[in-house]
Image: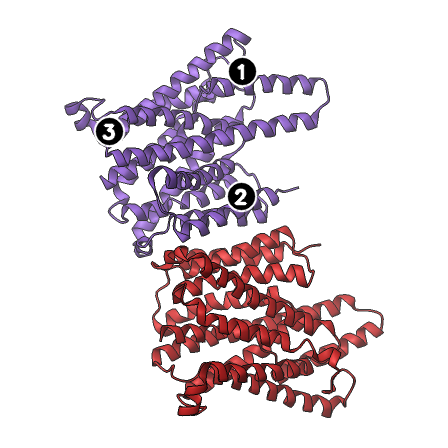
Chain colours: A red, B purple
Amino acid sequence: MEYRKIKDDDDEVQEDNDVASDLESLKGKSHTVASSNIALATLGGGGGSTERINWKRKGVVTCALTILTSSQAILIVWSKRAGKYEYSVTTANFLVETLKCALSLLALTRIWKNDGVTDDNRLSTTYDEVKVFPIPAALYLFKNLLQYYIFAYVDAPGYQILKNLNIISTGVLYRIILKKKLSEIQWAGFILLCCGCTTAQLNSNSDRVLQTSLPGWIMAIIMALLSGFAGVYTEAIIKKRPSRNINVQNFWLYVFGMAFNAVAIVIQDFDAVANKGFFHGYSFITVLMILNHALSGIAVSMVMKYADNIVKVYSTSVAMLLTAVVSVFLFNFHLSLAFFLGSTVVSVSVYLHSAGKLR
Amino acid sequence: MEYRKIKDDDDEVQEDNDVASDLESLKGKSHTVASSNIALATLGGGGGSTERINWKRKGVVTCALTILTSSQAILIVWSKRAGKYEYSVTTANFLVETLKCALSLLALTRIWKNDGVTDDNRLSTTYDEVKVFPIPAALYLFKNLLQYYIFAYVDAPGYQILKNLNIISTGVLYRIILKKKLSEIQWAGFILLCCGCTTAQLNSNSDRVLQTSLPGWIMAIIMALLSGFAGVYTEAIIKKRPSRNINVQNFWLYVFGMAFNAVAIVIQDFDAVANKGFFHGYSFITVLMILNHALSGIAVSMVMKYADNIVKVYSTSVAMLLTAVVSVFLFNFHLSLAFFLGSTVVSVSVYLHSAGKLR
């Protein structure tokens, strides 16, 4: 039960892998925006206006991700309360990928109808474009398999604490792989984000994590690197061809997501699926969670396209804190002093990220 | 026992009130430095060099304060371990003031012998100069009396947590009373310093402090304001006449410190002193603690003269963390995850304070 719980919590990370198509209204908007950007650029004026539009788009996708991630965590708490955790997580993940794939196609058919098929929005691809697309999905599969073994070294709450290493690994890999610079103040903010999130999660048993043995630490660091690498690599793939329609990029990412999740079903849940059926244990809340994960995945993909991994990490971290606050009202949660301190540190960190922008 | 412990811990704050004279070597140094500064200034050159010397002096007094505060806390732990807490804290405070007064005079006699008596180093004063000197001592007396009542509303560990409000009150009053500006980044650092110190002190009972009733919070805030106001006011007094010798300023501050501590003995410990004698319960460690408090007081005073209250707060906060690390080796203390997180936040805060300097 404890283990299943963690596995599901980790779906929050799994969504890094997600790419998307739906949010048709948002998509429509950003598409119009893109056209008007081009129009403005052709007119040779309005650089400031383009920047404002980019900012607006970045803001919209970031807010969408924050809200979806919060509601996702709340659904997890709700489903824990309801005690419904008997479905196979791998089948749910597979359905999430399938749903996003379908939504990508739906969005594309609308675009084709309005704009016609162009080089940027056609579905057919080249080996050169598609060869990198399986990599993030493969990294996630590997990470999820490792997760089965780390519990020999850390308990479940300890693993939740160690997952905050993802923040640091994402920052470091973002710097190394995407070669984008953060200012010193922004790095300070990033370290604080990691400390603040961890502080907010502290409870009376958290100190046990310090007793983690060396193999446990190594596995935790490898998992953080895999997760960070998958996120940063997805951004690299999506940004490599800026004019390529995001829905096409998402479609291909998700085709491989489906494939690798099918492998995960076979490795991890073959017996359960064979004996009890693919949909055993599904409930209304499971369906809601799958829907939410799909939409979150779309939001992550949009953030990767129009913002970056750093914004994604901030957005999901703030979502974690929002969830706790909302849970106070929904589930009568008690907020600890550590939570208040951690939240304050995270808030200052968000401020530093914006105040420390390289000029 | 618990209460006495707190009372003694609080002497760390009491030293804000301290002003000084000894550290003859350090004093001699700063005196020489002062003369050479004047020489350089008269020669009309070496502005950069003066600045470097000022920085060096600021660095020396800050390090002295940090080391003395750390060793002070270690003495407190040591004395707790030894179970020696049977002396009257008010008599010890009185002796600390007396010792500092004596050391001020000692330093002054040396200065008079070397440089002769000048307007800046003569002991005699005017009503206009001396009238403000009792104020910090009076504020501390009032704060220490309040301390007797706050324990009706918070327990001892809760009070330790609430004392971190001093950091914020010092920053706010420093801004309002001394009208010195901190940059936004430095304010961010200051908020983090408060969060980091509190996080480092977290334990499984810390959440109880959130249940503090309104009168408890009001008292804690008043005490933080009194403590912050006393510190900031001392800086204002010392800096009002920059050319006035620090030992003369210290002497007068401490004369009033002695007087107000005599009042405290009468109010709080009259019976114990009358029945068991002034020095009842004194031990070797008590003497060491008095000596250490006197030297710390001198260092605080030097920091007020050559740096400011912000540097003082940073210095004593870092000292708190150093103490915990040293205690691991001396007393086999265990460091908690919260301590590591809090220390990291404090370290980032120190960096931000220096990186965020107003240009």
* Image location (x, y in percent) of residue B14: 37, 32
Tell me the SS state at disc 1.
loop
Residue highlighted by disc 2: B350
| Circles 1 and 3 in contact, beta carbons < 8 Å | no
Q: Amino acid at mark 2?
A: Val
Give the camera-side residue of B219 and A205: A205
* Residue A35 left/right relative to A196: right
Residue B289 visible? The answer is yes
Tell me the SS state at disc 3.
loop
* Image location (x, y in percent) of residue A151: 41, 68
Q: Chain of mark 2?
A: B
The N terminus of chain A is located in which quarter? bottom left
Residue highlighted by disc 1: B120
* Residue B345 left/right relative to B164: right
Q: Chain of mark 3?
A: B
| Real-space CA distance between mark 1 and mark 2, rounded to the nearest whole angstrom | 35 Å
**Residue at the (67%, 63%) spot, across then down:** A177
